[in-house]
Image (cartoon, rainbow, N blue to C red):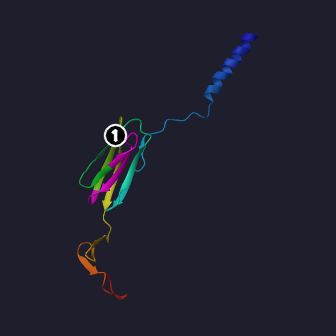
């Protein structure tokens, strides 16, 4: 009788271990963003979530974007700055994982440059701040 009670308690304790609900699956290593469109004169941050080891950042085409800064305990946070129009990839290597993010750099259709009280639109047309325009004028 004593052996049966011990056996039942042993079986119940083993079975209760299998039915635990607080067991979490391991989290995947991934990037926060997989595709980014950057307008010129702005910057974007990309982060590796759940890195197991230190992150190594690289750029496919260094003429289009530049990695301005890398931060975080495992270097998992990266700030990207555009240099000129085009498409490229930023890659992060974490241990055996290789993660990539597609980057498209575009210039606004009407990007302004301010020089000597003149606005330059698309480097061809200019107008002064002091000029007056009617509602019918098209800039």
* SS for callout 1: strand
In the displayed structure, would residue 114 be above or below residue 1?
A: below
Instruction: Name the side, left or right, on which 33 lies relative to 131.
Output: right
In the displayed orientation, state which residue is furthest to the front: 116
The residue tagged 1 is 93
Q: Quadrant of residue 97?
A: top left
What residue do we see at 39% from left, 35% from top?
53
In the displayed orientation, state which residue is furthest to the right: 1
Residue 34 appearing in the image: no
* Local crowd size for mark 1, using a 10 Å CA cut-off: few (<14), some (14–19), many (≥20): some
In this orientation, which residue lies closer to the viewer: 79 or 28? 79
Q: Quadrant of residue 1?
A: top right
What residue do we see at 24% from left, 72% from top?
123
Estimate the x, y position of residue 5 in percent, counting from the top left.
73, 15
Q: Quadrant of residue 126?
A: bottom left
Q: Which residues are magenta?
A: 69-86
Estimate the x, y position of residue 15 in percent, counting from the top left.
64, 24
Magenta-colored stretch includes residue 74: yes
Estimate the x, y position of residue 112 in percent, counting from the top left.
30, 71
Instruction: Name the side, left or right, on which 127 lies relative to 75.
Output: left
In this orientation, which residue lies closer to the viewer: 133 or 94? 133
In the displayed structure, would residue 20 be above or below residue 113?
A: above
Residue 124 appearing in the image: yes
What residue do we see at 62% from left, 31% from top?
20
Magenta-colored stretch includes residue 6: no
In the displayed structure, would residue 58 be above or below residue 12?
A: below
Quarter that holds the C terminus: bottom left
Estimate the x, y position of residue 48 in percent, counting from the top left.
41, 44
What residue do we see at 40% from left, 40% from top?
73
In this orientation, which residue lies closer to the viewer: 42 or 110? 42
């Amino acid at each position: 009788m004593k052996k049966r009670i011990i056996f039942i308690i042993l079986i119940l304790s083993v079975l209760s271990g299998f039915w635990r609900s607080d067991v979490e699956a391991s989290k995947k290593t991934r990037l926060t963003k997989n595709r980014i469109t950057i307008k010129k004169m702005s910057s974007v941050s990309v982060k590796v979530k759940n890195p197991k080891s230190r992150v190594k950042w690289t750029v496919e085409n260094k003429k289009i974007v530049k990695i301005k800064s890398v931060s975080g305990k495992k270097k998992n946070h990266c700030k990207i700055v555009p240099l000129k129009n085009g498409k490229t990839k930023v890659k992060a290597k974490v241990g055996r994982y290789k993660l990539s993010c597609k980057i498209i750099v575009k210039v606004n259709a009407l990007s302004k440059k301010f020089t000597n009280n003149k606005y330059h639109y698309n480097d061809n047309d200019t107008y002064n701040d002091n000029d007056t325009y009617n509602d019918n004028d098209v800039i």
